[in-house]
Amino acid sequence: MLPRIETLSEKKLVGMKKQMAFANNKTIELWKIFMPRLNEIRNSIRTKLFSAEVYGTPLFFQNFNPSSEFEKWAAVEVTELGIVPDEMETLILPAGIYAVFIHKGPASEGQKTYEHIFNNWLPNSDFTLDNRPHFALMGEKYKNDDPNSEEEIWIPVKTKDGYHS
């Protein structure tokens, strides 16, 4: 599974976030709260939903601990930040290089794709992780736990010589 390498322009997101850890995953709970309120977001670009993670430190994966907390976001891209609904916040995805992988299959099997990315592809690539949000894009081919589901997994990277945009 090889990624495509893309340079992302800055994205403005509006959504909801929750502190969680891999050992205490609350992603389903977050989306159940967010999705019924999606129509409240003005200026949204609803073609894709963003499931983003903000790890806060570049060492998060080097010293990996499944109990370490991070911010998990359920969000949608907007054309401008303007008015933000109650109990929602904004997240800016900075411009930069991303390795984009396609996860095919049920969302519940996404861990296999992430294991491939972090244990096989990344250590053998010309890239290292960059300290920017990670995210999955769920578009029209996303069907949650359907075996035919597809989503894009965007991993922020920079070249091993430090180039990142």
Image: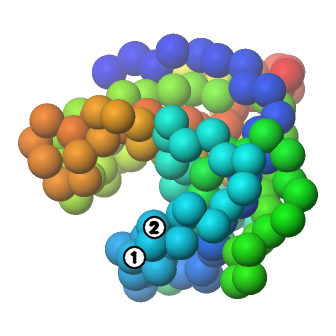
Element class at badge 1: helix
Q: Residue furthest right?
A: 82
**Residue 34 is at least partly visible in this image:** yes
Q: Residue 94's x, y, as percent?
A: 83, 40
Which residue is found at the position 60% from the left and 58% from the top? Answer: 75
Element class at badge 2: helix
Give, as a three-letter code, the residue at label 2: Met
Which residue is found at the position 78% from the left and 58% from the top? Answer: 91
Q: Residue furthest left?
A: 147
**Vertical order, 61 against 31 (above or below):** above
**Vertical order, 114 against 51 (above or below):** above
In front of the other: 4 or 60:
4
In contact (CB < 8 Å): disc 2 and disc 1: yes
Give, as a three-letter code, the residue at label 1: Lys
Q: Is residue 103 left or right of residue 59?
A: left
Which residue is found at the position 63% from the left and 40% from the top? Answer: 45
The disc label shown at residue 67, or none: none
Q: Is residue 116 left or right of residue 57?
A: left
**Vertical order, 130 against 15 (above or below):** above
Q: Residue 150's x, y, as percent?
A: 28, 35
The disc label shown at residue 35, or none: 2
The disc label shown at residue 32, or none: 1
- Crowding near the residue tagged with mark 1, few <14, some 14–19, many ≥20 C-alpha atoms within 10 Å: few
For the C terminus, the quadrant is top right
In front of the other: 128 or 155:
155
Q: Is residue 45 left or right of residue 145?
A: right
How far is the residue under mark 2 from the one under mark 1?
Answer: 6 Å
Which residue is found at the position 85% from the left and 65% from the top? Answer: 83
In front of the other: 2 or 146:
146
Q: Quadrant of residue 85?
A: bottom right
